[in-house]
């Protein structure tokens, strides 16, 4: 770049402060010379002149319809609701601090020429037609041209609206009686609440903010999903805009908005202060389990908005999914509204009143400043202060902010420094995508991460939520729950699919997990996302013996409560007092628990079989796992994209981890199972990819079941429409089997729970299937310490469990119980009522 053009560029960028600087110097010299020559008469005259000047400015201001780009009606309401003493008549005589307390609408200087103002339709300051001189027969509003100098008369007219002509729109009476007239003019217009969400929380928060704004007398805010808003419109957006944004490290609804903000901030074609009209505040929703990535998107949005000149009306707030997110939001919501409605709240005024017109500063970011004042509060610097330039205060030159001519020599140097900083900033932006990955344990600048305090996994809030859902919490990270099939089995009403496939009787089975946390947020997770998540264990670790004892105690305790339930069979109840199987699949990721091998060993010692389900994100843990009775991996999708969509994993390299887990499973030489949960429209296509994954891990069995609907609601976006019919599951399984060819066949089914078992033909001898387990043999093998395989402890499958058998996998020894329909319940109720009436009639007859 030539030096002439770089000078021109410098001039373009800093012409405003420089011009202001020059004006300041000129004003200063006038003030000084006046001071020297003044006589007492002169000072009286000066005072009069000043009063007249002030009156004129105030009138001009009142007529200025451009302030602050409000609708005509809203401007009128602000002026109307301001009382005479709230109008800063002594504008120029006020101290800077006092001046800043005034509402912007009143203190701002007129921008338009008088002629333009005259032409503008009057919304305030109208003479009401009273002052029109003879000869002016115009019927339109005079636009305040003939307004009286008598403030009282003027106010009377102003408050009644324009009366010049019937053609002029009548201004409705103020409806915002509750609102202090000093409040932000923006609040008179509806605020906009932008939200971004996947699982619905941000939207609920946005609705809450809207409701509390209305409850405080503000106009109904507009709720806008960020994906529906044209980001370019932010460049002209002037309404108070509140952003409630959730954080996603996967493709999410914020992506476009954040990209636009970031790009715009560094786009040299866009003015640096391009969002100066926007007044905003951001609340971020995230989950602290994401460590450094906690709320990073919303935080960046807050920063970039500020850096582009938008004015922050309330500081950034954040709500942690892993803590009291709702409580944090409520606190922020209340404080925001209280601050907006209270003109004495310093923060609001700081952000709101530091208008670029009066003191050369905008409320844009000063994020590099860490200076603090005597009270320890961060000092916000203006652009000029940052550059070490003298500031120009349009309101008050007596605050000691004199222009030091020597500083002018530093201007060029400071500007150069600023340019260099900007260049570095831009370079960092350009390089961000090619930046080397940080190694674990380092911050962005390569510094060692602070050692985190070891916390308990189950926070009090989570404890409350889980216990409400029927879990018993053991220690600080484990849980146990009685499943519905255990209850059904106690009443002789059938067993779960594990009975048909592997010979487990549900009343002998305990469902537990030593880790309530996992590294996914699956759409079908029945914990409704109250679970803690993490990619590494960062919680306190409980002892395996303590967990097992706690799980058994709680399990037996819950069984005890079922003793009196009608239909519970005494024999089953007694049998249930000795747990024989443990399903390590309740919730979370059992393999995540650092002492999982010891835990399983303890189970086997008690002759309790182990069915461990992992979600295929910890391949090393799979490789290191000692033999369990049956090792499962959940295969929730067959492509990277659909796995991301359905499991919503925390790990960025989730797909590699997934494939590595399947490989690790293939090498185990144990009894292994793939578990496929079909969610219609999510993972039911791509059959060929499933086949490929099966070939990769060579599992002994593939369990395929339709997702169970358990009221996912807004949290996952799943509805009953995503639950496949049994026939659809069958069709899917047939297609898989067809493509797999020899080596696998459909072995068994449990139609009741829409589950089908595809088994390796290793488990078929002649016509007979051997998918069941010889449990005693299994414990024998474990105790022998010898290597063994899944074929060493297989047992024959009963024919009623075969695929296509008329029993559909329901043990014929059990009583099939069909839930009563509404209609059946109605008939029964009516019959009972009839019987009661009949009985009453009989008794009455007896009495007679
Ligand atoms: C797939 C997925 C990825 C997430 N990524 C992050 C993240 O990177 N940082 C973070 O703080 N929170 C993250 N979260 C947590 C969400 O931001 C948090 O649960 C939030 O409350 C969700 O809000 P919503 O219900 O409005 O979508 C993630 C959640 C999911 C399901
Ligand atoms: S892996 Fe299991 S516990 Fe974890 S989110 Fe998925 S379904 Fe829920």
Image: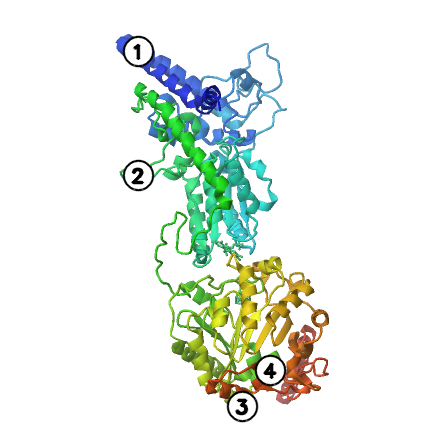
The residue under the point 36% across, 58% down is 452
Q: Nearer the viewer, residue 257 or 463?
A: 257
Q: Do the residues under discs 1 and 3 have CB atoms within 8 angstroms?
A: no
Neighbour tally class for label 4: few under 14, some 14-19, many 20 plus, Cα within 10 Å: many
Residue 259, given in percent of the width and then of the height, sits at: 54, 43
Neighbour tally class for label 1: few under 14, some 14-19, many 20 plus, Cα within 10 Å: few
| Helix, strand or loop under label 3 | helix
In the rendered structure, find residue 502 and report the number of the disc placed on it: 4
Considering only order in the chain, which callout, 3 or 1, is on the residue closer to the N terminus? 1
Say how many tags the image has. 4
Closer to the eye: label 4 or 2 = 4
- The residue to which callout 1 is attached is 34
- The residue to which callout 3 is attached is 570
Q: Quadrant of the C terminus?
A: bottom right
Relative to residue 33, is residue 597 depicted above or below?
below
Distance of label 4 from label 2 (alpha carbons): 69 Å
| Helix, strand or loop under label 2 | loop
Residue 96, given in percent of the width and then of the height, sits at: 34, 27
Q: Work out whether residue 224 can be spotted.
A: no
Relative to residue 417, is residue 823 depicted above or below?
below
Q: Do the residues under discs 4 and 2 have CB atoms within 8 angstroms?
A: no
Residue 771, given in percent of the width and then of the height, sits at: 62, 82
Q: Is 47 on the left or on the right of 64, as rendered?
A: left
Closer to the eye: label 1 or 4 = 4
Considering only order in the chain, which callout, 2 or 4, is on the residue closer to the N terminus? 2
| Helix, strand or loop under label 1 | helix
Q: Which picture quadrant has residue 392?
A: top left
Q: Nearer the viewer, residue 733 or 762?
A: 762
Q: Is 777 on the left or on the right of 796, as rendered?
A: left
- The residue to which callout 2 is attached is 372
């Amino acid at each position: 770049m030539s030096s002439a053009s770089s000078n021109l560029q410098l001039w373009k960028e800093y012409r405003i402060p420089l011009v202001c600087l020059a004006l300041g110097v000129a004003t200063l010299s006038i003030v000084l010379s006046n001071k020297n020559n003044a006589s007492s008469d002169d000072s009286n005259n000066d005072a009069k002149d000043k009063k007249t000047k002030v009156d004129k400015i105030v009138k001009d201001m009142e007529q200025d319809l451009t302030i602050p780009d409000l609708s005509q009606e809203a401007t009128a309401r602000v002026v109307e609701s301001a009382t005479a003493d709230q109008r800063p008549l002594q504008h120029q005589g006020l101290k800077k601090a006092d001046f800043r307390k005034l509402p912007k609408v009143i203190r701002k200087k007129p921008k338009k020429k008088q002629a333009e103002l005259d032409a503008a339709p009057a919304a305030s300051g109208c003479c009401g037609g009273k002052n029109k001189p003879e000869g002016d027969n115009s019927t339109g509003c005079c636009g305040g041209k003939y307004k009286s100098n008598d403030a009282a008369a003027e106010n009377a007219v102003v408050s009644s609206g324009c009366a010049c002509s019937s053609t002029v729109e009548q201004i409705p009476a103020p409806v915002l009686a509750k609102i202090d007239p000093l409040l932000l003019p923006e609040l008179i217009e509806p605020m906009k609440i932008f939200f971004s969400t996947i699982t619905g929380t941000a939207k609920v928060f946005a609705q809450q903010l809207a409701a509390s704004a209305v409850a405080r007398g503000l106009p109904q805010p507009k709720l806008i999903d960020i994906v529906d808003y044209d980001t370019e419109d932010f460049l002209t957006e002037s309404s108070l805009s509140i952003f409630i944004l959730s954080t996603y490290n996967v493709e999410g609804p914020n992506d476009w908005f954040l990209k636009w903000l970031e790009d715009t901030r560094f786009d040299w074609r866009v003015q640096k202060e391009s969002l100066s009209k926007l007044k905003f505040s951001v609340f971020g929703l995230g989950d602290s389990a994401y460590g450094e990535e906690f709320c990073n998107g919303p935080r960046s949005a807050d920063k970039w908005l500020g850096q582009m000149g938008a004015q922050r009306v309330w500081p950034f707030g954040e709500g942690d999914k892993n803590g009291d997110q709702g409580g944090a939001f409520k606190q922020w919501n209340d404080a925001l509204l209280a601050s907006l409605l209270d003109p004495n709240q310093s923060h609001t005024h700081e952000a709101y009143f530091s208008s670029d017109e009066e003191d050369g500063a905008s409320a844009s970011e000063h994020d590099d400043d860490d200076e603090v004042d005597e009270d320890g509060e961060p000092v916000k610097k203006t652009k000029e202060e940052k550059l070490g330039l003298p500031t120009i205060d349009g309101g008050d030159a007596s605050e000691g902010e004199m222009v030091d001519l020597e500083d002018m020599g530093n201007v060029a140097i400071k500007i150069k420094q600023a340019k260099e900083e900007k260049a570095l900033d831009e370079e960092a932006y350009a390089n961000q995508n090619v930046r080397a990955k940080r190694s674990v344990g380092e911050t962005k600048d390569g510094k060692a991460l602070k050692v985190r305090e070891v916390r308990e996994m189950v926070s009090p809030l989570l404890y409350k939520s889980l216990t409400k859902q029927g879990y018993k919490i053991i220690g600080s990270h484990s849980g146990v729950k009685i499943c519905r099939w255990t209850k059904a089995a106690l009443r002789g009403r059938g067993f779960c699919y594990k009975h048909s496939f592997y010979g487990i009787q549900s009343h002998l089975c305990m469902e537990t997990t030593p880790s309530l946390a996992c590294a996914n947020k699956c759409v079908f997770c029945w914990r409704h996302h109250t679970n803690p998540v993490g990619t590494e264990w960062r919680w306190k670790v409980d002892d395996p013996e303590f967990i097992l004892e706690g799980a058994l105690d709680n399990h037996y305790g819950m069984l005890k409560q079922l003793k009196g339930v009608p239909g519970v069979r005494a024999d089953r109840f007694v049998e249930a007092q000795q747990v024989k199987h443990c399903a390590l699949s309740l919730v979370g990721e059992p393999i995540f628990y650092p002492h999982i091998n010891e835990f399983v060993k303890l189970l086997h010692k008690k002759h309790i079989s182990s069915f461990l389900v992992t979600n295929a994100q910890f391949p090393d843990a799979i490789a290191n796992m000692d033999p369990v009775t049956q090792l499962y991996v959940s295969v929730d999708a067959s492509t990277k994209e659909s796995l991301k969509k359905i499991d919503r994993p925390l790990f960025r390299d989730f797909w590699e981890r997934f494939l590595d887990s399947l490989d690790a499973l293939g090498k185990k030489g144990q009894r292994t199972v793939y578990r496929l949960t079909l969610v219609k429209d999510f993972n039911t296509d791509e059959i060929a990819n499933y086949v490929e994954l099966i070939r990769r891990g060579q599992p002994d069995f593939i369990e395929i079941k339709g997702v169970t609907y358990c009221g996912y609601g807004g949290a996952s976006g799943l509805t009953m429409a995503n639950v496949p019919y049994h026939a659809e599951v069958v069709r899917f399984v047939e297609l898989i089997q067809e493509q797999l060819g020899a080596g696998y066949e459909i072995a068994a089914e449990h139609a009741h729970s829409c589950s089908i078992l595809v088994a390796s033909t290793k488990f078929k001898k002649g016509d007979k299937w051997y998918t069941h387990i010889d449990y005693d043999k299994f414990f024998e093998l474990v105790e022998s310490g010898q290597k063994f395989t899944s074929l060493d402890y297989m047992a024959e499958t009963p024919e009623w469990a075969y695929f296509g058998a008329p029993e559909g996998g329901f043990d014929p020894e059990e009583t099939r119980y069909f839930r009563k329909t509404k209609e059946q319940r109605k008939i029964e109720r009516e019959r009972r009522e009839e019987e009661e009436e009949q009985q009453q009639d009989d008794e009455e007859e007896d009495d007679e």
